[in-house]
Amino acid sequence: MNRLFGLLFFLWTMPLCAVPAVVDYVLDGDTFAAAVNVAPDISITVRVRLINVDTPELSGECTAEIELANQAKQMVKNLLPSGTVVDLQNIKDDKYLGRIDANVIMPDGRDLGNVLVQKGLARKYSGGKRYGWCKN
């Protein structure tokens, strides 16, 4: 638990700096786990949620949403295979303990959230009510 607080303190004190992280595994289209160094030879794995982006849910309300969610997850897995080093920017605390929100900059310099939006697998999200992915 102390390592988690150390990581959060480290991340909160560097909001304007890019913090490198090594991708471990992808949970869904807008969340993955990554290792972040908090001290020399000490790293902690946190869940990273893309900031300002919403992707469909894997447990969606309709077949179309579930299919889009799987496509988004697969795209993230293709873009960020395990071991990929990304930069986390604009890091914020998340409502879930052990998870942070951040812009994710891929090795080629592109923002992961923007790529997902451009491909139609995510949409911009600034908080508040989220709209469904199913057509009524």
Image: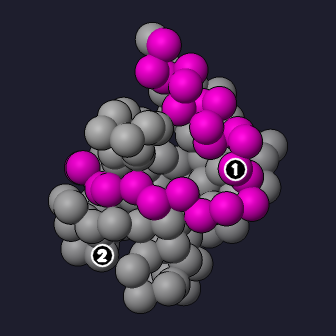
User: What amino acid does circle 1 point to?
Assistant: Met
**Residue 79 tag number:** 2
Under circle 1, the secondary element is loop
Against 119, is 81 above or below? above
Q: CA distance from mark 1 to mark 2?
A: 26 Å
- At which x and y percent is residue 118? 54, 85
Reading the chain from its start, which is encountered first: label 1 or label 2? 1
User: What amino acid does circle 2 point to?
Assistant: Leu
Q: Residues within 10 Å of mark 2 (few under 14, many from 20)?
A: some
- At which x and y percent is residue 22? 32, 56
Q: Quadrant of residue 85?
A: bottom left
Please name the residue shown 73% across and 52% down the image.
Answer: 15
Number of the front mark, 1 or 2 = 1
Against 123, is 34 above or below? above
**Residue 14 tag number:** 1
- Most extreme residue toward the top is 1
Please name the residue shown 55% across and 77% down the image.
Answer: 111
Please name the residue shown 19% across and 59% down the image.
Answer: 82
In the picture, measured across the screen, residue 40 lies left or right of residue 99, that is left
Q: Is residue 25 visible?
A: yes
**Residue 83 tag number:** none
In the picture, measured across the screen, residue 78 lies left or right of residue 44, that is left
The magenta region covers 2-25
- At which x and y percent is residue 64? 37, 62
Against 92, is 132 above or below? below
